[in-house]
């Protein structure tokens, strides 16, 4: 009598080993994309807030605005 669960486990293990490099590459590319987007937001968000303050008639050099940019 064969154990179908052991066979199923072996099939699942082989399937996972075949797809493992693809999954790793996909995760790495998504992580890189999110890191890039985070870096862009980190660099330009404070300047963008100053632009919005200036457009609405506020003083971008105001002390409260400076706290947002830090």
Image (cartoon, helix red, strand yellow):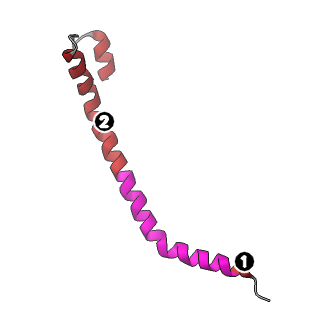
Q: Is residue 20 magenta?
A: yes
Helix, strand or loop at mark 1: helix
> Image point 72% across, 81% down: which residue?
4
Vertical comparison of 65 with 4: above or below? above
Q: In the rendered structure, which segment of residues is drawn in magenta?
A: 7-32
Residue 50 point in image, percent of width and height: 23, 20
Relative to 63, is 18 on the left or the right?
right
Quick one: label 1 or label 2, which is nearer the N terminus? 1
Q: Quadrant of residue 68?
A: top left
> Image point 39% across, 64% down: which residue?
25
> Image point 36% across, 47% down: which residue?
34
Badge 2 local density, few (<14 within 10 Å), some, or many (20+)? few
Callout count? 2
What residue would you read off at disc 1? 5
Residue 11 point in image, percent of width and height: 60, 79
Q: Quadrant of residue 13?
A: bottom right
Q: Main secondary structure of the magenta part?
A: helix
Any mark on residue 41, and which? 2
Q: Is residue 22 magenta?
A: yes
Vertical comparison of 70 with 26: above or below? above
Query: Is the residue under label 2 in contact with that under label 1 (CB below 8 Å)?
Result: no
Front position in the image: 58 or 47 = 58
């Amino acid at each position: 009598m064969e154990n179908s669960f052991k066979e199923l486990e072996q099939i699942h293990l082989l399937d996972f080993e075949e797809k493992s490099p693809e999954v790793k590459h996909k995760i790495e590319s998504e992580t890189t994309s999110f890191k890039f987007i985070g870096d862009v937001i980190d660099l330009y968000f404070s300047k963008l807030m100053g632009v919005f303050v200036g457009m609405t008639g506020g003083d971008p050099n105001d002390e409260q605005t400076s706290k947002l940019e830090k």
